[in-house]
Amino acid sequence: MMDLIVAERRALVGVLEDLSADQWHAPSLCEGWTVAHVVAHLTMPFRISPEEFGQGMAQAHGDFTVFSDAVAARDSELPQADLVAALRDNVANPWQPPGGGLVGALSHDIIHGLDTARPLGITYPVPDQAMTAVLDMAVSPGGESLFGFDLRGIELRASDLGWSSGTGDPVIGHSRDVLLLTAGRIVPPEAFTGPGVQRVWAGAR
């Protein structure tokens, strides 16, 4: 799993270090966040000490979303080169999100990488093994994805992987778009085919 994490981070560094200033400050798929915000958030575990984390969480009254939003807003103003360097210098960092393990770290990296790259029309390599592991984690058993996307009554299919999950009306798309959909991102319906598409975007499920 660490090999997959290292490969993902290196590939993302290659994308981020070549972005223009306009691209760096362009909207991402994370609502209200630019690419700079996402990279600030993505590198937060490598830049924030345990003491800073504790103080920030106390100021946010224990609300991690409030804390991480504040850090992203503040640190998005850091130089692009500094934030990219923070990722480059930590490609092999074994950080894991609480309760998520290494696959959770891989999921964090891949989803936020796509949050930055997809709106810019950039595609970079994500190994099939890595994408499959993250998709499997995202659709862990239950009526909703790990991120709250309603899975009832549909079968998700990744056309490029031969991966599928669920039962019901098929929703078929590239694995990257399927993952972003399960992660609650806004993905254009034309990125998908299958009889489940209309149900998903009509909100009938």
Image (cartoon, grey):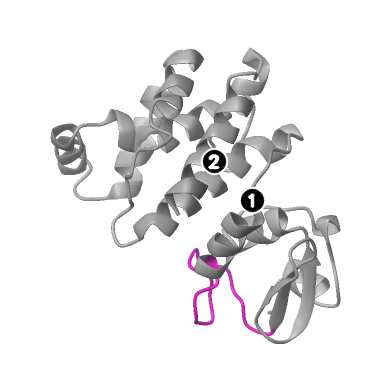
Look at the numbered disc 1 and give the secondary structure of its residue: loop
Q: Is residue 125 left or right of residue 189?
A: left
Instruction: Please give the name of the residue rendered at 54% of the width and 63% of the height, measured from the top-left corner.
Output: 133
Q: Hey, what amino acid is under mark 1? A: Pro
Which quadrant of the view contains residue 121?
top right
First-in-chain label (2 vs 1): 2
Q: Mark 2 points at which residue?
A: 7
Q: Nearer the viewer, residue 34 or 117?
A: 117
Q: Where is residue 183 shown, x and y percent of the image?
A: 57, 58
> Which residue type does callout 2 highlight?
Ala
**Residue 90 position (above or below residue 184):** above
Residue 167 placement, left or right of 197 = left
> Observer-nearest residue: 125 or 195?
125
Q: Which residue lies furthest to the front in this view?
A: 3
Note whether 128 is above or below 80 in the view shown: below
**Residue 70 can be seen in this image:** no
Q: Give the range drawn in magenta.
A: 138-153
The residue shown at (40%, 32%) is 72
Residue 47 location, x and y as percent?
A: 30, 28
Question: Which residue carries the number 1 mark?
Answer: 127
Give the secondary structure at mark 2: helix
Q: What's the distance in space between the residues labelled 2 and 1, CA to CA?
A: 8 Å
- Membership of 144 in magenta stretch: yes
Q: x, y percentage for residue 108?
A: 47, 49
CA neighbours of label 1 inside 10 A, class few (<14), some (14 to 19), many (20+): few
Can residue 156 be seen here? The reply is yes
Q: Does the magenta stretch include residue 200?
A: no
Residue 14 image offset from top left, x and y in percent = 61, 26
